[in-house]
Image (tube, rainbow, N blue to C red):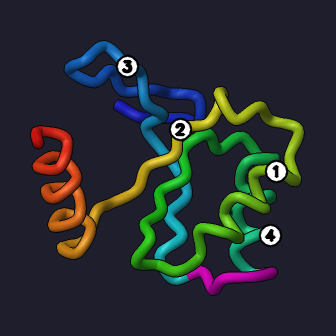
Amino acid sequence: MIQSLQDRIKLNNGVEMPGFGLGVYKAEEGKEVVEAVRTAVNHGYRLIDTASFYGNETGVGEGIRETDVAREDLFITTKFGMMNKVMMKHCVLLKEV
C-alpha cells in the first residue's frame, strides 16, 4: 500500500518504481509545466508521467533540469500513441533487413 512519496512498487523485472507521481496531461507547455515539475520534484516526487501526445515534454525536461535531483534518481514514464507504434514496427522491420 502506498502511503508516502517515498514508497515504491517492485515491477516484475525487479525495478522499483515510485508508487505516486506527477501526471502532466493537462499542464500547458511552458511556464506552467516547468513550474509544476520543478515544484513536485523539489517536494519529493520522483515519478513524472508524460507522453509526446501531451505536447509538453520540453517543459518537463526544463523543470527537471531546474532541480538539484539527479536524473538517475527520477522515474519518467511515457506512452506510445498509435503513430509511434507504427513507427516502432517499421524500425524493427528495418533492423531485420
Where does label 1 land, which residue? 65
Give the crowd class for mark 4: few <14, some 14-19, many >=20 residues within 10 Å. Answer: some
- Viewer-nearest of labels 1 and 3? 1
45 left or right of 85?
right
Give the crowd class for mark 2: few <14, some 14-19, many >=20 residues within 10 Å. Answer: some
The magenta stretch spans which residues?
27-31
The vertical placement of 87 against 54, above or below, is above
Answer whether labels 4 and 2 touch (C-beta < 8 Å): no
**Amino acid marked by disc 3:** Val
Per the model, the C-alpha gap separating discs 2 and 1 is 14 Å
84 left or right of 70?
left
Residue 68: image location, x then y, percent = 88, 38
Q: Specify the principal SS of the magenta part.
A: loop
Q: Which of marks 3 and 2 is nearer the N terminus?
A: 3
Find numbered disc 1 in the image and state the secondary structure of the residue it sits on: helix
Where does label 2 land, which residue? 75
Residue 29: image location, x then y, percent = 66, 82
Q: Which of marks 1 and 3 is nearer the N terminus?
A: 3
Per the model, the C-alpha gap separating discs 4 and 1 is 11 Å
Residue 7 magenta-highlighted: no
Where does label 3 land, which residue? 15
